[in-house]
Image (spheres, rainbow, N blue to C red):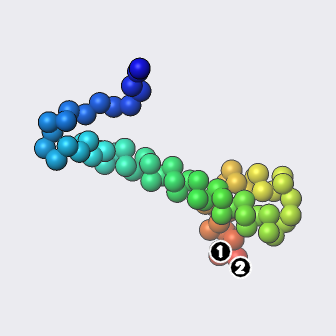
Amino acid sequence: MSHSGPVYDAGMPGGMPPRPKVVQRSVNVAKAGASLGTVLAVTISWSVHKSILWAIVHGLLSWLYVVYYALTR
């Protein structure tokens, strides 16, 4: 049997794994924000244009398109 995840010492105070560093948490939040922006952009684009091509283009622009849409509507 093999173990693929991190191994923690059971004798650690509290028995909890170490908390992720601030940089790692920031990267995770940025990835989640990028995903949310992409989903919003694609959803808005599809509801307005009903075009897969425009949805892809706006998904690549993500937050830029969401902010543009919010300012122009």
Under circle 1, the secondary element is: helix
Q: Is residue 10 left or right of residue 67?
A: left
Distance CA(mark 2)–CA(mark 1): 6 Å
43 over 20 or under it: above or below: below
Residue 21: quarter of image: top left
Disc sitting over residue 73 in the figure: 2
Mark 1 and mark 2 in contact (Cβ < 8 Å)?
Answer: yes
Quadrant of image for the C terminus: bottom right
Callout 1, which amino acid? Ala
Which SS class for mark 2? Answer: loop
Query: Which class describes the residues within 10 Å of circle 1: few (<14), some (14-19), or many (20+)?
Result: few
Quickly name the residue at label 1: 70
Q: Is residue 36 left or right of residue 28?
A: right
- Residue at the image point whose x is 81% and y is 70% from the top: 48
Pick the front one: 13 or 35: 13
Q: Is residue 10 visible?
A: yes
